[in-house]
Amino acid sequence: MKKTVLFITPHLSTGGLPQYLYKQIELIHNDVTVYCIEWEDITGGRLVVQRNKIKELLGNRLVTLQGNKHELFNYINNINPHVIHLQEIPELFMQNDITQVLYNADRPYVLIETTHTSQYDVRTKRYLPDKFLLVSKYQFDAYAPLGVPCDVVQYPIEYKVRNQSKLSVLNKLGWNSEYKHVINVGLFTPGKNQAEVIEYARRLSEYPIQFHFIGNQAENFREYWEPLMQQFPSNCKWWNERDDVDMFYQAADMMLFTSTLEAMPLVVKESICWKLPTLLYNLPTYTEYFSRFDNISYLTENKEQNLTKILATLGLSV
């Protein structure tokens, strides 16, 4: 008889958490029976790239809770899972009265937590699972002192093989093959810091470079992205969210990832999978993880030096 695993996720809006969850489900769904409960649908029918992929795998075993979150326990009683795996710590999205019942000392299931943030103050943690499965060494170092068994489960790096020429991909996307193409992938937020990429694009407007932004502009971050789009340089193009991002990695000459707030960004790993030259900040939360990869170089606090690095990476002269 197969074991049953129930994932509980705060949302399935396009991003790193849903992609990590999708990969987990993809890897185990043939060996165990998988259910997934989405705490809240915040997509409004948009931003559903990963949600659609999870739905394709699970069908009606993907459930979204509505207004009464206590319905969670009806599903748990019906599913009778061996393992319940939260894709974020409950303190960040669950009501206390629900969490208290879920974490009851007499619970018949194994309770596992994963978190996708590096910003939570672990000293305030109130509820303890049976195990943490964490996405980075930085998180491991933070959570290990709680005395709960911890393991790091990294999103896998699966190197890609091109099945078509770069020129063919450029033509499919309608990109000028005489230009160099720089991509930035991610939700438009202050932490992702697309403003800095736009600043570099503006400074490099005389060069044959096109900058491409792949990522959604969610309503709750409008205050950040709307002013950027009102003064969007002509050498920049926004592609919204896409379900064919691999095409962009294949067509690009460089990834420019200026994020200043990350745990373990999956888009950088995707860039590594395509061996795409990538410039990013070496954040403390990475604990030098990316330094082992030949296609990774680091930005500095000096913007002039960064401009020079961008041009050098693209094979252009200052």
Image: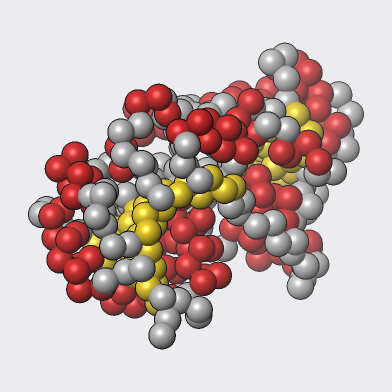
Say how the picture is coloured.
secondary structure
- Quarter location, residue 8: bottom left
Is 154 situated above or below 91? below
Residue 308 position, x and y percent, is 81, 23
Question: Residue at image x 57%, y 63%?
Answer: 244
Is 22 situated above or below 225? below
In the picture, the quarter occupied by the C terminus is top right
Q: Residue furthest bottom?
A: 1
- 81 with respect to 201 (left or right): left
- 252 with respect to 258 (left or right): right
Residue 274 position, x and y percent, is 74, 56
Is 128 situated above or below 57? above
Question: Residue at image x 89%, y 29%?
Answer: 317
- 180 with respect to 256 (left or right): right
- Quarter location, residue 57: bottom left
Of residues 279 and 138, the one nearer the viewer is 138
Q: Residue furthest front?
A: 106
The answer to whether one can see residue 21 in this image is yes
Of residues 304 and 84, the one nearer the viewer is 84
Question: Residue at image x 34%, y 77%?
Answer: 59
Residue 181 position, x and y percent, is 72, 45
Q: Residue furthest left?
A: 68
Is 125 situated above or below 50? above
Of residues 96 and 108, the one nearer the viewer is 108
In the picture, the quarter occupied by the N terminus is bottom left
The answer to whether one can see residue 176 in this image is no
Question: Residue at image x 18%, y 50%?
Answer: 101
Q: How many marks?
A: 0
